[in-house]
Amino acid sequence: MRILIVEDDKALADGLLRTLRQSGYAVDHAESGELAVRACGEEHYDLTVLDITLPQMDGFEVLRQLRRSKQSGSIMILTAHDSETDRVKGLDLGADDYVTKPFSLPELEARVRALIRRSQAVKSPIITLGALTVDVVARRAQLGDEDLDLTPREWAVLEYLLMHTGQVVSKEQMLQALCSWDDSLTHNAIEVYVSRLRAKLQTASIRIRTVRGFGYMVEETDDGQR
């Protein structure tokens, strides 16, 4: 899933980028409100983590513009402003969560996971389809009682497909969701990861179906066909 960090403190931004990328997210960084608004106009982000104290355009104005433009992703305010007035203002403007600095990284990551599940309309961190069970918090996949060995990229592709079970997703949508600005994933690479997943999921009673001309769809099989 794709996240935008809007933070002018470089040390904090670097720490958040490193932590969230290690958790498997594609993460971009905007140092100003203007760049954040532009980025959100060009890309879809499942979550924007937004500071309030930004140069020129502050976080409240960024939030106001994003919600006015009908951005569908979740927005978390992450700020040193801890007054009740600021919290109320942020939530009333459309923020989905409000976290004050200093903060605990484990709690922040838990809030990130919860907001991304909400943005994808997934209520539980446990996704089950056929014989496959995926825990998006523990980042663990199992076929029956056996652990499924996945590379980070295979995990990211599988998680994205499962978040959209029953829907056709294009390669372009997958690239946009899985790649940050400095990644170099290609359409051919998506095909390779899907092929590897199909091989690993042969006994799962699910299939990743190619919808010619549109993309892929993951679905449970009724007759054992893959």
Image: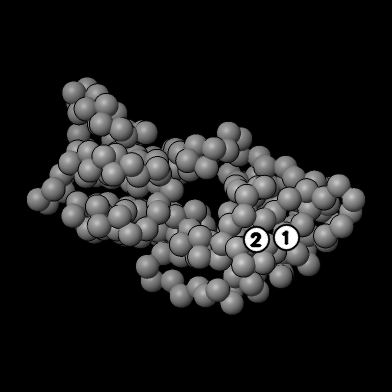
What SS does tag 2 mark? strand
| Viewer-proximal residue among 3 and 18 | 3
Q: Which residue is mark 1?
A: 209
Q: Residue furthest right?
A: 223
60 lies above or below 145: above
| Viewer-proximal residue among 9 and 122 | 122
As drawn, the label of residue 153 is none
What SS does tag 1 mark? strand
> Does 6 sit left or right of 160 as displayed?
left
Q: Residue furthest front?
A: 213
Q: Amino acid at mark 1?
A: Arg
4 lies above or below 94: below
Mark 1 and mark 2 lie on one chain; the one further toward the N terminus is 1
* Tag 1 and tag 2, C-beta contact below 8 Å: yes
Residue located 30% across and 55% down the image: 41
197 lies above or below 66: below
Q: Amino acid at mark 2?
A: Tyr
Residue located 25% across and 57% down the image: 38
Residue located 78% across and 48% down the image: 220
Q: Residues within 10 Å of mark 2 (few under 14, many from 20)?
A: many
Residue 226 in which image quadrant: bottom right
Q: Is residue 22 visible?
A: no
Residue located 56% across and 66% down the image: 171
As drawn, the label of residue 216 is 2
Q: Is residue 4 visible?
A: yes
Q: Position of residue 213 (x, y in %)?
A: 62, 67
80 lies above or below 25: above
Q: CA distance from mark 1 to mark 2?
A: 6 Å
Q: Position of residue 73 (x, y in %)?
A: 40, 44
> Does 7 sit left or right of 76 as displayed?
left
Q: Position of residue 138 (x, y in %)?
A: 61, 46
Residue 128 in which image quadrant: top right
